[in-house]
Amino acid sequence: MAERAALEELVKLQGERVRGLKQQKASAELIEEEVAKLLKLKAQLGPDESKQKFVLKTPKETLMGKYGEDSKLIYDLKDQGGELLSLRYDLTVPFARYLAMNKLTNIKRYHIAKDFDIAGNFDPMIPDAECLKIMCEILSSLQIGDFLVKVNDRRILDGMFAICGVSDSKFRTICSSVDKLDKVSWEEVKNEMVGEKGLAPEVADRIGDYVQQHGGVSLVEQLLQDPKLSQSKQALEGLGDLKLLFEYLTLFGIDDKISFDLSLARGLDYYTGVIYEAVLLQTPAQAGEEPLGVGSVAAGGRYDGLVGMFDPKGRKVPCVGLSIGVERIFSIVEQRLEALEEKVRTTETQVLVASAQKKLLEERLKLVSELWDAGIKAELLYKKNPKLLNQLQYCEEAGIPLVAIIGEQELKDGVIKLRSVTSREEVDVRREDLVEEIKRRTGQPLCIC
């Protein structure tokens, strides 16, 4: 134990030395030499089995080769000392590496505001259905408009490409072309496959007969009877799982939000089974609103082989997950608020405690404390004698809906003047009734005494 503690201290000191050299912009040769010493110390230290930190640090070489043509979305940069670094494209590959490094076989992970994953050996399509249920719940609760979740299966795509005559070496690059069908016409996709990727025109035409189809479980059943597609074992497995998935989605009550779309390909190389992508349904633009063109707002799928790529013994851990397009959703919300000329609330404060005259700081402090104790989200300006106009303007800018105004006359009458910021309507409320009135106006549960 003492020996390990000594090594940990050496690692810490060496790490500080490396960081110091980088800050000083020392030569690349010197930094490389000190980094090598640091790595050697870390190797001697080995893993600490007693610590289970969820850290998704991933070397650049680990990321490369997992995203197919989307590898161009990994950004390379160098720090001050010349060390090559990368910005992760997503967290799926680092998560798979974490599972392998820590020998985990079952875990459910939620990454705040963005990702959700389920890892482990479970019966088919139950975790996948849960992921789609979560995706639908999130998008519905955000109230960003009607949406549709497209689903497909990489095994169906691979089987379809095989029976259409695509060589194994071209599967992924043709897959990437097909995935553009939600943005460009079939003719443009066909021209890319034939002109740029060397696919025979007749093969492209056979692919076109399939990838332009979309529907529900009836399309799945139709393709199960397709004389050509049924020759592919891969495609039949994928179709069988999709049929089961639709059964679970019906039980979850979200089958009306799901469409089986044969053009959905998801260009990432690590997907092995079911894939899905949520898109907003285009609606006529409102007055002053630009047409929305943000692409997908959520996506995911099954990646059963990724963990095994990092495990020394090649042990596989089946995984399925989803990612929410937070930045795209923000752009939609911001655009719609601008079109409606609505202000974005920058605070959860429900009421500002204000004063109409000077020398009422003590009364403001007493009232805001009463509201806090009652569970009301209240605040006041940190000034002894703020002007009433400034306090009202602050509410308008921050989006605070109510103002509780204390004045000399209100104190004499035992009331508080409650003002609606939007309508500017003011009413006198007895002080003992103020909490209940604010809760009524803000939709909070009332006290049952």
Image (tube, rainbow, N blue to C red):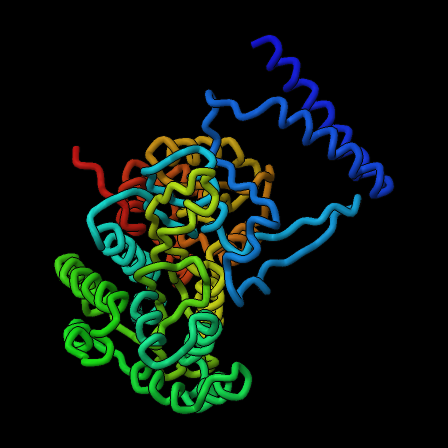
Quarter of the picture containing the N terminus is top right
Tag count in the figure? Answer: 0
Q: Indicate the position of residue 132 as horizontal and vertical percent values.
A: 28, 58
In the visual, does 142 lie left or right of 332? left
What residue is rendered at 45% in x and 61% in y?
A: 269
Question: Residue 157: horizontal and vertical position, in percent?
Answer: 34, 71
Q: Is residue 132 left or right of residue 368?
A: left
The quadrant of the picture occupied by the C terminus is top left
**183 over 45 or under it: above or below:** below
Position in image of residue 438 (x %, y %)? 32, 46
Q: Is residue 5 above or below residue 57?
A: above
Q: Say which residue appears at 32% left-offset and 46% top-offset.
A: 118
Is residue 160 toward the left or the right of residue 365 in the image?
A: left
Q: Nearer the viewer, residue 263 or 329?
A: 263
Residue in front for this viewpoint, 250 or 383: 250
Q: Nearer the viewer, residue 204 or 271?
A: 204
Task: Report the residue at 37% width, 49% height from top.
Answer: 116
Q: Position of residue 140 (x, y in %)?
A: 29, 61
